[in-house]
């Protein structure tokens, strides 16, 4: 939905003034020209050198004109679609996302090591089937707009975990997907699966239903693998999300302004590389600016600095005219408790008010180490409340209603008025999970806590929700792609071996 800077005033949260943004941007250009970035991919180095960058081994110092041209070349907006529903063609645009500054969409995150088992409640390693469950729950939740898998599958060939993850997600949701990958070969595998679902490469390119999620490293490093993935994606018209840190006090200086420079230098140099590969390639940059916990040196995923600096990054992206991915709905809590509710609510509200475009990591616990479907269900309710706030208050002749006030007059009531009956559901948000009943009614209905209602809703989704089926023949093609990937990498040592 449109927020912050649309035709009518809506609630907004800005951290930086335009003058402050300009200072950060100019400092970033100086940093790239003076300090430069580490570029460990040969093709990317050649692209930058050909455009006028200074090369010293893998360290490249990038003059401002390359960055400015990259920003100018990147599209302000691009579209992600839900996967095709051939038997329900009229609904093919149902889950369409317009990726543009100030339209806000929420989803989960990727690569947690652990998963809260929805049946037993135990914290265990992520295994096959969990990304499919996540996708099915996301498909059922009204306010989750796109899908990521929450977990890093542990019981498959390690290098192929993201490929299996995408295969499960695409079979269990009609919503857009943001998969990740270890290598360009994995991006190719995922692309082949998406083409099998779309029916042809031309059909996918016309309506892409996934964007590849890739990361840069702080401070100021682009790895060979990360650049290989985004360059392959750009060549094949796959939308790209390119995201990185830093962690204040660890992978950037401790001040917020310097962290913004470290983030922006990496994000914009990556954007420039992608635009040199294919001018006009659709890219959303992103940042996860965690503070370092001063007691243990660990990144603090639930810190207020995350929301504050994420909103500042959204301000900068709006000023540049580039979509931005932020973070919300995550918590440092180890289970779904009051801490998880506090941190998730703060993040979702401030991310929504900041106008960040793609907001990910809903469902994360324990510093992005545990994926929780219960947390996803809770965040769906928080997002619904936030979206009501983002709608703001419309003030015009149709909403001031002076004639109605005059007709009812002092001491009257408006409950029986036709206007109230017609407009009350649009004006007054009604919760799905939050309880508003009086004590006696709540007690008579079983005196359920919020956590019990969340778990009941999750059980209902898992028992009853059925995602749209894959097109005929797509499942067999996906299985063949997985088998070919196994033949290629089944004997390759796992990541970290």
Image: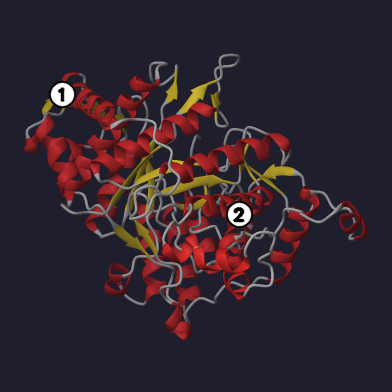
* Residue marked by disc 1: 33
Task: Decide if residue 195 is on the left or right side of residue 436.
Answer: left
At 25% from the left and 36% from the top, the residue drawn is 268
Residue 317 vs residue 275: left or right? right
How far apart in space, not on screen, are marks 1 and 2 (Cα)? 43 Å
Q: Is residue 421 above or below residue 317?
A: below
Query: In the rendered picture of this protein, how many numbered marks are placed on residues?
Result: 2
Q: Nearer the viewer, mark 1 or mark 2?
A: 2
Q: Is residue 69 left or right of residue 419?
A: left
Q: Is residue 130 above or below residue 423?
A: above
* Quarter of the image where one finds residue 36: top left
- The reply to whether residue 170 is in sight is no
Which of these two is toward me, 308 or 191?
308
Residue 380, label in figure: 2
On the rendered image, what quadrant is the N terminus found in?
bottom left
Q: Position of residue 3 (x, y in %)?
A: 41, 51
- Local packing at callout 2 (Cα closer than 10 Å; few below 14, some 14-19, many 20+) is many
Q: Position of residue 388 (x, y in %)?
A: 54, 54
Q: Percent position (x, y) of residue 230?
A: 29, 48
The secondary element bearing badge 2 is classed as helix
Relative height, residue 17 to residue 126 (above, below): above
**Measuring 47% from the left and 56% from the top, which residue is drawn there?**
163
Q: Is residue 399 visible?
A: yes
Q: Residue furthest top?
A: 295
Relative to 48, 328 lies left or right? right
Q: Percent x, y for residue 190? A: 40, 60
């Amino acid at each position: 939905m449109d927020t912050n800077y649309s035709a009518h005033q809506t609630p907004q949260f800005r951290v930086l003034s335009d003058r402050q943004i300009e200072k950060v941007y100019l400092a970033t250009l100086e940093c790239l020209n003076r300090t430069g970035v580490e570029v460990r991919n040969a093709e990317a180095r050649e692209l930058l050198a050909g455009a006028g960058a200074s090369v010293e081994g893998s360290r490249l110092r990038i003059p401002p004109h390359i960055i400015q041209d990259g920003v100018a070349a990147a599209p302000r907006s691009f579209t992600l679609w839900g996967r095709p529903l051939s038997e329900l063609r009229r609904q093919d645009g149902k889950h369409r996302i317009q990726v543009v500054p100030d339209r806000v969409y929420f989803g989960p995150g990727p690569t947690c090591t652990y998963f809260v088992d929805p049946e037993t409640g135990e914290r265990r390693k992520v295994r096959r089937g969990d990304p499919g469950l996540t996708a099915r729950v996301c498909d059922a939740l009204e306010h989750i707009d796109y899908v990521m898998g929450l977990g890093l599958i542990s019981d498959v060939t390690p290098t192929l975990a993201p490929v299996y993850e995408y295969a499960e997600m695409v079979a269990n949701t009609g919503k857009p997907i943001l998969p990740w990958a270890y290598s360009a070969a994995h991006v190719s595998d995922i692309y082949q699966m998406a083409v099998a679902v779309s029916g042809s490469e031309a059909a996918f390119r016309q309506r892409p239903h996934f964007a590849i999620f890739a990361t840069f490293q702080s401070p100021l490093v682009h790895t060979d693998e990360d650049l290989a993935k985004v360059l392959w994606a750009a060549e094949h018209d796959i939308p790209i999300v390119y995201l990185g840190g830093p962690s204040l006090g660890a992978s950037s200086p401790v001040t917020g302004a310097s962290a913004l420079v470290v983030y922006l230098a990496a994000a914009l140099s990556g954007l420039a590389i992608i635009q040199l590969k294919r001018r006009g390639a659709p890219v959303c940059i992103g940042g996860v600016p965690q503070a370092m916990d001063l007691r243990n040196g660990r990144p603090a995923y639930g810190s207020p600095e995350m929301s504050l600096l994420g909103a500042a990054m959204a301000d900068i992206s709006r000023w540049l005219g580039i979509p931005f991915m932020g973070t919300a709905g995550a918590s440092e809590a180890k289970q779904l408790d009051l801490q998880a509710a506090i941190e998730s609510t703060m993040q979702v509200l401030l991310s929504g008010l900041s106008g960040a475009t793609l907001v990910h990591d809903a469902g994360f616990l324990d510093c992005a180490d545990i994926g929780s479907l219960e947390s996803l269900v809770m965040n769906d309710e928080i997002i619904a409340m936030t979206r009501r706030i983002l709608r703001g208050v419309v003030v015009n002749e149709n909403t001031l209603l002076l004639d109605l006030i005059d007709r009812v007059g002092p001491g009257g009531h408006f409950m029986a008025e036709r206007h109230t009956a017609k407009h009350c559901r649009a004006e007054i948000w009604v919760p799905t999970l939050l309880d508003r009943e009086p004590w006696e009614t709540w007690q008579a209905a079983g005196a359920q806590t919020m956590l019990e209602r969340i778990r009941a809703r999750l059980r209902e989704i898992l028992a009853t929700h059925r995602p749209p089926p894959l097109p005929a023949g797509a499942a067999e093609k996906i299985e063949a792609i997985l088998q070919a990937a196994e033949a290629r990498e089944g004997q390759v040592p796992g990541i970290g071996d």
